[in-house]
Image (spheres, rainbow, N blue to C red):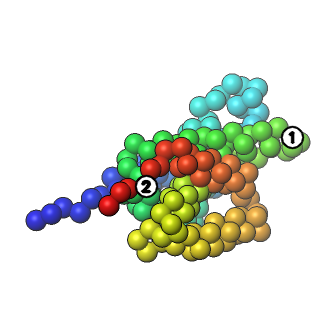
Amino acid sequence: MRQKPEAICTVALIVINIAVFFILTMFGDTEDAVFMLQHGAMYEPNIIEGHEYYRIFTCLFLHFGITHLLNNMVLLGALGWNLELEIGKVRFVIIYFASGIIGNIVSLFYDLTLEQPAVSAGASGAIFGLMGALLYVVIANRGRLGRLSGRGMLVMVILSLYFGLTSTGVDNLAHIGGLVSGFLLAVLLYRRKQY
């Protein structure tokens, strides 16, 4: 019996994010900015003045409430599964974390220009990185990859950005930074399979 290839890294990331969320809910309120800040959320003064650079990474595993978590995990599952099986585990992990970190750095620089920086957390910068990478992979495969089409991916990107821009409390700069860096990383790392 032939075993179907599994997207192990995608599954592992979902499990880790859910585990972190439920561990934190045992100790406090994940919708409380102060509580989240105490547990690794991103906040410009802590990073720039306090030199707590680890927050650029740790905030990727934190979510403000169950709805935030579920929305991100559904997207991570859908995008990650398709991308990981096509691009491979190592490249997938590089794109996920690099996009998330770059997205957070873009957001951080934007926060420096504001007088009221916000506490931010979530995997969405990294997830937008997967979206950008998958968009490139579909384009590189002449506009189709399995059931995915270039047009469908483009519509998904536009709708995702639109919902972010028209919603409150969304770190759109992290989304855009992640999306662009994911696309560019895929350009560098992906080579189309020869069948």
Which residue is labeled 1 in the image? 113
Q: Quadrant of residue 147?
A: bottom left
Q: Is residue 157 left or right of residue 109?
A: left
Task: Name the residue located 69 percent from the left edge and 39 percent from the top edge.
Answer: 105
Whether residue 127 is visible to the viewer of this picture, yes or no, is no
Q: Give the mark, 2 or 1, whose residue is nearer the N terminus.
A: 1
Q: Which mark is residue 168?
A: none
Residue at x 15% of width, y 63% of height: 2
Give the Cα separation between the discs numbered 2 and 1.
Answer: 41 Å
Q: Considering the image in quadrants, where does the N terminus appear?
A: bottom left
In terms of depth relative to the viewer, which is nearer, 124 or 148?
148
Secondary structure category for the residue under label 2: loop
The answer to whether 71 is drawn above or below residue 130 in the figure is below
Residue 191, position in %: x, y? 44, 50
Q: Nearer the viewer, residue 104 or 43?
A: 104
Residue 186 rendering spot, x and y as whole percentages: 53, 49
Name the residue: 80% across, 43% down: 110
Seen in the picture, residue 18 relative to 74 is either above or below; the reply is above
Residue 82 position, x and y percent, is: 42, 62
Say which residue appears at 59% left-offset and 74% top-offset.
Answer: 151
Pointer 2 residue: 192
